[in-house]
Every structure is written in structure tokens, then in C-alpha cells.
Image (cartoon, rainbow, N blue to C red):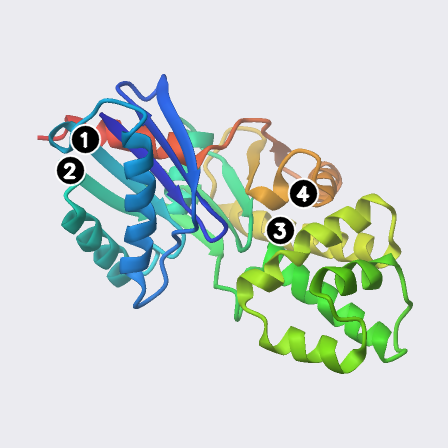
Amino acid sequence: MLIGVDAGASGTSIALAEHPSTPLARALGEPAAITPGRESESAKAIGKLLETVREKTTWEPASAVLVVGAAGAEDIACRNALAEELEKLGLVRKLDVTTDAEVALESAFPTGAGILVYAGTGSFACTRLTDGTIERVGGLGWRIGDEGGGYQLAVAALREVGRALQGRAENTGLRESVANHIGHSDRPSFVRWANNAERDEIATLAKLVCDEARRGDPVAVQLVRNAAQDLLELARALIPVVTSEGTVPVALAGGLLSDGSPVRDHVLSLLDNSLPGAGFCNCRVDGALGALQLAHRLARQV
């Protein structure tokens, strides 16, 4: 049995198959992105999801090959620690842990060159070089990077709402929407919430920004445009290293770039008008399916 897992900061996706082209079962679970010192928690979340799908199918550990593509796996020590924790669970015969970038690229461009731009809670862009190595930009984490991602979009919204509460910016529907969501409309309690909320709590505000942008809120629209510009710059940084005849294909992935997202709409507009040499690749990007392909290769290794 082949098992592919895409472990992200917002959730985890799993796919099972006897052949990578025909998944037998799919499921979604809790976030399982890797953070230093908390690899066991990531392993537990993945193990829980494995047990869930195991109940829906008939497979035994002795026949199972698992590949996990995880956010945070660029850190080799964290990657190895997660692999060790997963091995302790004894749920599979063979496993490998790699990055979320690799499984996404495998899904988007299994046989050719291209650039993948990802925006969920965090953000990055990546491409596979001719020697098989992956070149990645962005993805520096929520404290110092992840420009254009959901967390940074939410922080930008909080900043604008804070300015509005001080009378330094226009009051728009975004302020009311954020205040209703967090349950604080006065300045002191808003500031207290914003400075004490967990990262994932803050990141949920990205959806509110997108909703307000669809309604035409001028502040939300500008924030979405800024996020799209940041994501375009990630793609631009990779254009010189991509070996491709003609136009370089650019694929989009992640919740913030899903169909119907205003961030996606603005990125597509910028691709058409502001990134010479690149063109949109309307391919399906599914990290769990990309991980399945890698699991298939791993299973064939002696």
C-alpha cells in the first residue's frame, strides 16, 4: 500500500493507493507541520490520520510505504526527528520525510520544469533544477518571512484596524468584520487580543480579509493586492534559474491561492501583465498525490 501525506500548518491531507494514479482513500486531519522540539506532536497527528484511513481500507504495516511532505522539513534535524517518531509508531514498512515543496512540485510538474507558488498560512516559491535539487525562495517562517501568506495578510489587517481605532486610517467594513470575529471592538481590548493571540488564531483572519475584498472594501482590496505582489516577487526570483524552453509555467497552490480567492485573482492578473517570460499553468496541485508518486518510487527501491 502506498501512502502520501501533505502535512501543513493549517491541516494535513492523506492519500492511499495501490497504484499512485488511482487513490483508494482520502482524508483530512489536524495540522502536522514540523516545529523544532515538537516533532512528536506532528508524528502523533499523522499517526492519528493513518489510523483513520486504515479503518476504511484493508492494509497492514508490513505492506505499507509512506512518504510525508511536511512544512518545516527544510530543517534537516527536524526532518530526521519526525522520521524517527513516525518509525516508532510501527504503522508502515518503509517511510521517508521530505519537504512540502517537493511533494507539491511532484504533483505540479512531475516531468518538466516550472515554478510553484504556494500560499497558505505561510508562503514560498520553488522549482526543480536539472540535477533534481529543489531551489526555494521565501518560506522564512512567520516571524521574519512568509510574505503574501495568510498569517502575514492577517497581521497587515490587524495593523490597519489598529490604525483605524486610533483615527489614523479610514474606518471600513474590515474593521467591523475583524472586531466581530475576535469579539473586541474597543482599542484596549483589541490591542490586548492582537498581542496575545496565537499564530493560528491570527491567521484565521486572512479569510475575513478575502471576504471583505470580494465585497469591495478598499483597505482589504489593497491588502490583497500587496499579498499578490509579494507572491509574484517570489516567482520572479526563480525565473533566472529555471531551464525551460519558451514560457516558464507557473502553478499556484495553497488555500490562499485556491479557486475563487481574490489573492489568486490578483496573482493571475500580475502574471499576465508584470512577469515577462512566465505563464500560468492551470494544473492541479495536490501535495498528498505528489507524495504518493514519491512513495511509489520508494517502494521500488531495493
Tell me which numbered mark, 1 or 4, is placed earlier along the sequence.
1
- Give percent across and percent down for residue 85: 20, 54
What amino acid is labelled 1 in the image? Ala
Whether tag 2 and tag 1 are in contact, CB under 8 A, the answer is yes
Q: Is mark 3 on a helix, strand or loop?
A: helix
Q: Which of marks 1 and 3 is in front?
A: 1
What amino acid is labelled 3 in the image? Leu
What amino acid is labelled 4 in the image? Leu
Tell me which numbered mark, 1 or 3, is placed earlier along the sequence.
1
Tell me what residue is drawn at x 74 percent, y 54 percent: 209
**In the drawing, does residue 174 fall left or right of residue 122?**
right
Q: Nearer the viewer, mark 1 or mark 4?
A: 1
Q: Badge 3: how crowded within 10 Å, few (<14), some, or many (20+)?
A: many
> What is the quadrant of the C terminus in the image?
top left
Whether tag 1 and tag 3 are in contact, CB under 8 A, the answer is no
Tell me which numbered mark, 4 or 2, is placed earlier along the sequence.
2
What amino acid is labelled 2 in the image? Lys
Name the foreground residue: 74 vs 39: 39
Which label was assigned to residue 231? 3
Q: What element carries label 2?
A: strand
**In the drawing, does residue 109 fall left or right of residue 84?**
right
Q: Which of marks 4 and 2 is in front?
A: 2
Q: Mark 2 points at which residue?
A: 94
User: In the rendered view, would you say 192 is above or below 219?
Assistant: below
- Give percent across and percent down for residue 173: 87, 57
Question: From mark 2 to mark 1, how far is it between C-alphas?
Answer: 7 Å
Tell me what residue is drawn at x 52 percent, y 27 percent: 284
